[in-house]
Image: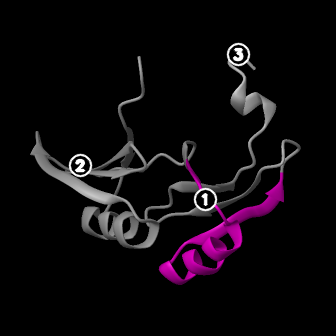
Amino acid sequence: MKVHHFAIEVRDLARSADFYANVIGFALTSRIDLNGERIVFLALGGHRLELVQSASAISPASRMHLALEVEELIPWLDRLPRAGCVLVEGPVRWGNGWRSAFLTGPDGELLEFIEAEETVADSVPGI
């Protein structure tokens, strides 16, 4: 078994697709209209992200977050606010050597940007 994709409900599909493609670096892979929903699939590093805009009034989930690993955190923290993101927390250094920050995306979704160093837990199954 493997993860196929992650999905985020959005209010403005065009704005969100533009953000994830042009600010974050995802590649647009497909567009679908299905049962009153407009859907865009994007890909980055072998992972898929589904953006869904429903015809009904929605309240995008705020408890979930999308974590993106980056080589250097600080350049992203400089760039993302210029794209409309708001810093919520961080940057913080975790006990395992990771450094991360949480920001809001275009629909208020929570994004975590992680500068990770490989740890024993990352390389040993079951830990």
Q: Residue at x 78, y 50 (%)?
A: 98
Which label belongs to residue 126?
3
Quadrant location, the C terminus: top right
Q: What residue sits right under mark 1 in the picture?
A: 70
- Judged left or right of residue 41, residue 38 is left
Q: Is residue 36 magenta?
A: no
Q: Quadrant of residue 79?
A: bottom right
Q: CA distance from mark 1 to mark 2?
A: 35 Å
Q: Amino acid at mark 1?
A: Val
Observer-nearest of 115 and 34: 115
Q: Mark 1 or mark 3: name the one nearer the start of the chain.
A: 1
Tell me the SS state at disc 3: loop
Q: Is residue 19 left or right of residue 55?
A: right
Range drawn in magenta: 67-93
- Residue 39 vs residue 32: left or right? right
Vertical placement of residue 49 versus 76, above or below = above
Which label sits on residue 56? 2
- Give the image location of residue 63, x and y in percent: 58, 43
Please report the residue visible at 32 percent of the width from the left and 70 percent of the height from the top.
18
